[in-house]
């Protein structure tokens, strides 16, 4: 009976395709056929049939043509979208014209953004973008005084700000905006009560939970720059970031559970010789503090006044957050976010992900990566609800939380989609209420993302989101009013434009790959680094753009597709994305080369033949005195080093034993050549 049903489904699919023949070279016929299949025989079919049909229908679509769309906005979605209202307000007819206007009239565009976001000023700006502004370091919002944390509390007091879920508890907890504001103001009082003064940096080394959000906003409100440290970092990496930011204190936790494992961050903080620690959680209340001067979060909160806190008012360029992004050396770039940067994050959320005040936004992330602060601002500044899950996001428990919390906007890294599929995590959860998916952190895979769209019956696009910490959001992304094809980008971000240059420095042709460059200025773009020469990192030696325009280096390899679409192919330099986290080859090699069995290593990121997330491949020259190298044993040893000294999320895909490493005339390892060799072998 099952086989008969499968045969009947296949026959009905083939019959419908036949009615739309010829499909080859006919994009309109292909699109019409796909719509008919989704509405007909595929409506209740398993996803494998969707993927087979997708490949069958669009087999002849080429990179130079407009990519096939799995999502097209309904009339109701178009009418509801924030960009539709913005376009009408500024007098343009469609999204393409809106984007063109946003980069032609940048000051006017950001004025509209600030009004839409209801950014509260103590002193309004005299001008948004001065006429005499240097594109590399413009004086945005000249004359303004404000605190961006206040923009997180313009929603009605009774609206739900945060919904909490835990992997060991089926119940949900709701925090109203008035409750969150009261806790944030109390935290600001508590930090000041410790003797911390505006400008003193305080590290957050916590999982993304309620206390983390309260501490984050409390620090910003009090004028204390947040030092963001991922909860997966080893003590040496914590120590480096504390030193770079000159942190005066650290907020951490004695223990938290995730996927059956206990993580003691307080112990790691002590190993990192962190400054005064503020310990969050029930375990902290029960345990004795290991060092004199360390204090408990619940005690300092209980002692803090319940009265309103007067926000620290600052200039737009004052630092609110110090985040870190790996460059091409072992020391990460220390990137300051200012009171301006969250405006970019909230804008991207509002216009590209179309976040409304009735949305519930969930994005499994960490305060140590830009998507943690991004989530805070993109949801709360837009008056939406932020959904936080304390537990492993690759589990069935998380999938049920998404349904129970009423999540409408779900963000992810591509490896999560693959994990959900392989584990069948979504089989007992209904995700049809999701209106928008978004993806960042690494290159994605079309099959996985078509699967995501099918979970929401193709009514929710996957908005690809590529950018970085030094942008405060994305440079390439999508929008809910445009057709969306899985694993592609449909637009540069509003208020920002890009060019894709080939190896000869000219514009990349449709279907070709090249390096992406940004055309500044934009709110959100960094203007300084704490430990590097900003101009050298982003502007020195860059080519000129159209009509001699100044270009800003970013370093992503991007393929131009037809119709103004794009596809990302990872980093152009030796920085890679592993598990959604940037890491340089040198950071990995520094750790692996310390193993006695290795003479020298070269770490490269490769892309699977079918596309998708980058994989770490290590080329290793073994220590000659150690005899015949055992690749399997070496992989285990090097993985253990990476786990304990860098990050357990960095997984080695393959070890390749070589006699020598190829080098340039200046003795630099030619990682691109190694990458090309491996991918050629992989494809064969």
Image: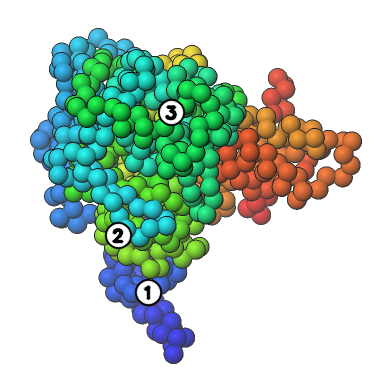
- What residue is at 57 percent from the left and 51 percent from the top? 608
Q: At numbered mark 2, what does the secondary structure look like: helix, strand or loop?
A: helix
User: Reading the chain from its start, which is encountered first: label 2 or label 3?
Assistant: 3
Label 2 with label 3: CB-CB less than 8 Å: no
Image location of residue 41, percent across then percent down:
33, 76
Image location of residue 142, percent across then percent down:
22, 13
| Crowding at mark 3 (Cα within 10 Å: few <14, some 14-19, many 20+) | some
User: Reading the chain from its start, which is encountered first: label 3 or label 1?
Assistant: 1
- Residue 404: mark: 2
- What residue is at 53 percent from the left and 43 percent from the top? 263
User: Reading the chain from its start, which is encountered first: label 1 or label 2?
Assistant: 1
- What residue is at 26 percent from the left and 14 percent from the top? 315
Disc 3: which residue: 295
Disc 1: which residue: 45
**Farthest residue in the bottom direction?**
1
The way the protein has been coloured in the rendering is rainbow
Asked if one can make out residue 508 in the rendered structure from this viewpoint, the answer is no
């Amino acid at each position: 009976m099952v086989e008969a049903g499968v045969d009947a489904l296949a026959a009905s699919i083939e019959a419908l395709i036949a009615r739309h023949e010829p499909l080859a070279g006919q994009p309109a016929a292909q699109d019409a056929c796909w719509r008919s299949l989704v509405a007909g025989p595929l409506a209740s079919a398993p996803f494998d049939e969707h993927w087979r049909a997708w490949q069958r229908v669009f087999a002849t679509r080429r990179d130079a043509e407009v990519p096939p769309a799995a999502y097209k906005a309904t009339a109701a979605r178009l009418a509801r979208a924030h960009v539709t209202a913005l376009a009408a307000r500024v007098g343009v007819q469609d999204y393409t014209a809106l984007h063109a206007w946003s980069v032609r009239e940048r000051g006017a565009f950001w004025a509209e953004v600030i009004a839409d976001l209801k950014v509260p000023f103590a002193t309004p700006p005299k001008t948004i973008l001065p006429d005499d502004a240097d594109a590399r370091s413009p004086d945005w919002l000249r004359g303004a005084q404000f605190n961006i944390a206040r923009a997180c509390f313009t929603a009605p007091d009774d609206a739900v700000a945060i919904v909490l879920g835990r992997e060991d508890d089926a119940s949900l907890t709701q925090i109203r905006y008035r409750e969150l504001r009261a806790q944030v103001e109390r935290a600001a009082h508590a930090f000041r009560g410790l003797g911390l003064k505006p400008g003193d940096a305080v590290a957050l080394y916590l999982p993304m939970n309620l206390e983390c959000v309260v501490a984050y906003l409390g620090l910003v409100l009090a004028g204390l720059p947040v030092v963001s440290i991922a909860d997966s970092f080893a003590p040496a990496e914590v120590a480096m970031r504390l030193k770079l930011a000159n942190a005066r204190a650290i907020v951490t936790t004695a223990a938290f559970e995730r996927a059956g494992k206990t993580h003691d961050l307080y112990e790691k903080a002590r190993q990192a010789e962190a400054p005064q620690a503020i310990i969050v959680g029930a375990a902290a209340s029960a345990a004795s503090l290991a060092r004199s001067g360390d204090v408990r979060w619940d005690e300092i909160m209980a002692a803090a006044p319940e009265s309103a806190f007067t926000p620290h008012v600052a200039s737009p360029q004052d630092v609110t957050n110090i985040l870190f992004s790996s460059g091409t050396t072992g020391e990460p770039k220390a990137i300051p976010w200012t009171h301006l940067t969250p405006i970019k994050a909230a804008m991207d959320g509002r216009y590209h992900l179309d976040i409304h005040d009735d949305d519930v936004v969930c994005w499994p992330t960490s305060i140590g990566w830009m998507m943690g602060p991004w989530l805070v601002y993109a949801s709360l500044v837009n008056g939406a609800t932020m959904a936080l899950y304390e537990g492993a996001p690759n589990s069935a428990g998380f999938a049920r939380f998404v349904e129970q919390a009423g999540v409408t906007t779900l963000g992810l890294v591509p490896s999560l989609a693959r994990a959900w599929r392989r584990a069948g995590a979504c089989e007992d959860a209904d995700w049809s209420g999701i209106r928008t998916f978004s993806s960042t952190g690494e290159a994605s895979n079309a099959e996985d993302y078509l699967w995501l769209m099918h979970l929401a019956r193709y009514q929710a696009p996957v908005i690809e989101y590529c950018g970085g910490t030094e942008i405060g959001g994305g440079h390439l992304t999508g929008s809910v009013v445009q057709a969306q094809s899985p694993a592609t980008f449909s637009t540069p971000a509003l208020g920002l434009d890009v060019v894709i240059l080939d190896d000869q420095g000219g514009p990349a042709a449709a279907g070709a790959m090249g390096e992406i460059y940004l055309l500044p200025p934009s709110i959100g773009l960094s203007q300084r680094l704490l430990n590097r020469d900003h101009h050298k990192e982003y502007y020195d030696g860059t080519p000129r753009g159209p009509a001699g325009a100044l270009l800003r280096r970013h370093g992503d390899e991007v393929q131009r597709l037809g119709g103004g679409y794009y596809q990302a192919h990872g980093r152009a330099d030796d920085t890679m994305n592993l598990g959604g986290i940037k890491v340089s080859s040198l950071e990995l090699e520094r750790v692996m080369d310390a193993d006695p069995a290795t003479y020298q290593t070269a770490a490269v990121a490769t892309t699977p033949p079918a596309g998708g997330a980058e994989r770490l491949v290590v080329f290793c020259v073994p220590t000659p005195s150690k005899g015949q190298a055992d690749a399997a044993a070496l992989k285990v040893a090097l993985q253990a080093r990476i786990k304990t000294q860098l990050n357990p999320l960095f997984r080695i895909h393959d070890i390749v034993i070589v006699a020598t490493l190829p080098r340039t005339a200046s003795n630099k390892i030619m990682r691109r050549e190694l990458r090309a060799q491996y991918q050629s072998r992989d494809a064969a």
